[in-house]
Amino acid sequence: MTEIAGDGDTRTASAVQSVDRALVILEIVARLGEARVTDVAAELGVHKSTASRLISALESRGYLAQAHNRGRVQLGRSIVRLARSADTDGDLVRHSQQFCTNLAEEVGETVNVSVREGDRAVCVVKADGPSGVAAYTWVGQSGPAYATSSGKLLLAELPEAELHECLAAGLTALTPQTVTDMSELTRVLKFVRARGWAESEEELEAGLNAVSAPIYDHTAKVIAALSVSGPAYRLKAEDFEPVARSAQAVAAQISNRLGYQSA
């Protein structure tokens, strides 16, 4: 005897599909930074009206918010709230925010704390410096790890086999300065590991420079990177080392708060 799904089963299946699509939308926006309804509809393979309804529902609960670019959405504050409540690394966000704010005031540039998620570096803490021109980033934004100072620092901790698996999709040139050769990137990461800090000189975005220092947890594992970023005309290559030293000092303070004890 053939079983026929009742109305309840149909409604349940529809609800599950909507939840799945909503989660995929969040992943799309996280990956792109900002997205239009048409972008989301195309990636989901649904009609624009369907994507619009789902986006509106996510906006109403604060998981998405209107971006500065009209007609686009970005991750909302509810994502930050969930990230903070789910933090399992000694409350990285809570311990980092004030240190980042102080450092941003000291160096006059934007300070971020980022973690690695797959092949991307995701910002979890941000503090703006007093200058009128700051790096345009926000909590929840992510970038290709190989093209950011924070990402390179985090990738440098991976065994070579895991590194190749992580970057299996390849290295795409974002600017003329982006490293796109895996052998060259491996060499750079080896140098980063030996030196103890990383840099990105217009590799992610033309006109944007950054340096990063590692944050350790109580097991001496690098769990995040603290970065200082700013316009290339202000954060110049000759400034990288002294700014990186400041970043290292602050990253060490955060690490101590997380239970790390240097040898």
Image: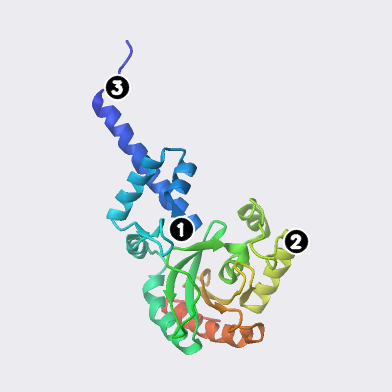
Which numbered disc, 2 or 1, marks the residue that appears first in the sequence? Answer: 1
Which residue: 36% across, 41% down? 49
**Where in the figure is residue 205, as x and y percent of width and height?**
60, 68
- On the question of residue 261 being in view, the answer is no
Q: Secondary structure at mark 3?
A: loop
Q: Quadrant of the C terminus?
A: bottom right
Q: Residue 251: which numbered mark, if any?
A: none
The x, y position of residue 106, in whole percent, is 47, 89
Is tag 2's residue or tag 3's residue first in the polypeptide sequence? 3
Q: Give me the residue at 47% from left, 38% from top.
A: 45
- Whichever of callouts 3 and 1 sits on the residue coming sooner in the sequence is 3
Q: CA distance from mark 2 to mark 1?
A: 32 Å
Q: Nearer the viewer, mark 2 or mark 1?
A: 1
Of circles 3 and 1, the one toward us is 1
Q: Mark 1 highlights which residue?
A: 34
According to the picture, the residue beneath numbered tag 2 turns out to be 183
CA distance separating discs 2 and 3: 55 Å
Kindly identify the amino acid type of the residue bearing the numbered disc 3. Ala
Q: Marks 3 and 1: CB-CB under 8 Å?
A: no
Q: Secondary structure at mark 2?
A: helix
Residue 173, picture quadrant: bottom right
Which label belongs to residue 5? 3
Q: Disc 2 vs disc 1: Cβ atoms closer than 8 Å?
A: no
Nearest the eye: 235 or 186:
235
Q: Which residue of the protein is positioned furthest toward the top in this rendering?
A: 1
